[in-house]
Image: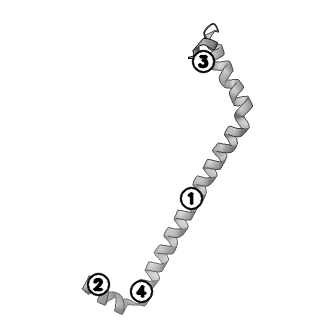
Amino acid sequence: MAGKGIFAGLPWWVTWVVVPVILIVVFGGLIASAVGFLIGLLFKVLIAAALIAGVIYLVRRFSGSSSSSSSSSSKSEW
């Protein structure tokens, strides 16, 4: 493994502290934008699911109350 050979002679703090800090500094903007994109996408999915559920609830509520005669006949068949 080439990775172990590169870090073999270095102290532990270089491998576990300095290298991750350098990577976060260099790729921090990319990481932050990816996390922000995923959180934004999740938020939009949740909003869309809530809106669709609300529309389904309203349609079932108002269509069931306006046509109660046809609804009662379909319930007896069911």
Q: Position of residue 44 (x, y in %)?
A: 60, 58
The N terminus appears in which quarter of the rendering? Answer: top right
- Judged from the image, the secondary structure of the residue bearing numbered disc 1 is helix
Occupied quadrant, residue 21: top right
User: Which residue, given by chain and number where applicable, does mark 3 sit on?
Assistant: 3
User: Which residue, given by chain and number where applicable, does mark 1 sit on?
Assistant: 45
**Dot 2 and dot 4 residues touching (CB under 8 Å):** no
Position above or below: 33 against 52: above
Q: Earlier in the sequence, mark 3 or mark 1?
A: 3
- Judged from the image, the secondary structure of the residue bearing numbered disc 4 is helix
User: Which residue, given by chain and number where applicable, does mark 4 sit on?
Assistant: 65
Q: The residue under label 4 is which amino acid type?
A: Ser
Q: Can the viewer see residue 7?
A: no
Position above or below: 8 against 39: above
Q: How is the image coloured?
A: one colour
Q: The residue under label 1 is which amino acid type?
A: Val
Q: Position of residue 22 (x, y in %)?
A: 71, 24
Q: Residues within 10 Å of mark 2 (few under 14, many from 20)?
A: few
Q: Earlier in the sequence, mark 2 or mark 1?
A: 1
Give the CA distance from mark 2 to mark 4.
14 Å
Is 46 left or right of 66, judged from the image as shown? right
Which residue is at a point 60% across and 17% down the rendered structure image? 2
- Judged from the image, the secondary structure of the residue bearing numbered disc 2 is helix
Q: The residue under label 2 is which amino acid type?
A: Lys
Is 48 left or right of 26, judged from the image as shown? left
Position above or below: 34 against 69: above
Q: Nearer the viewer, mark 4 or mark 1?
A: 1
**Dot 3 and dot 1 residues touching (CB under 8 Å):** no
Is 29 left or right of 51, judged from the image as shown? right
Give the CA distance from mark 3 to mark 2.
69 Å
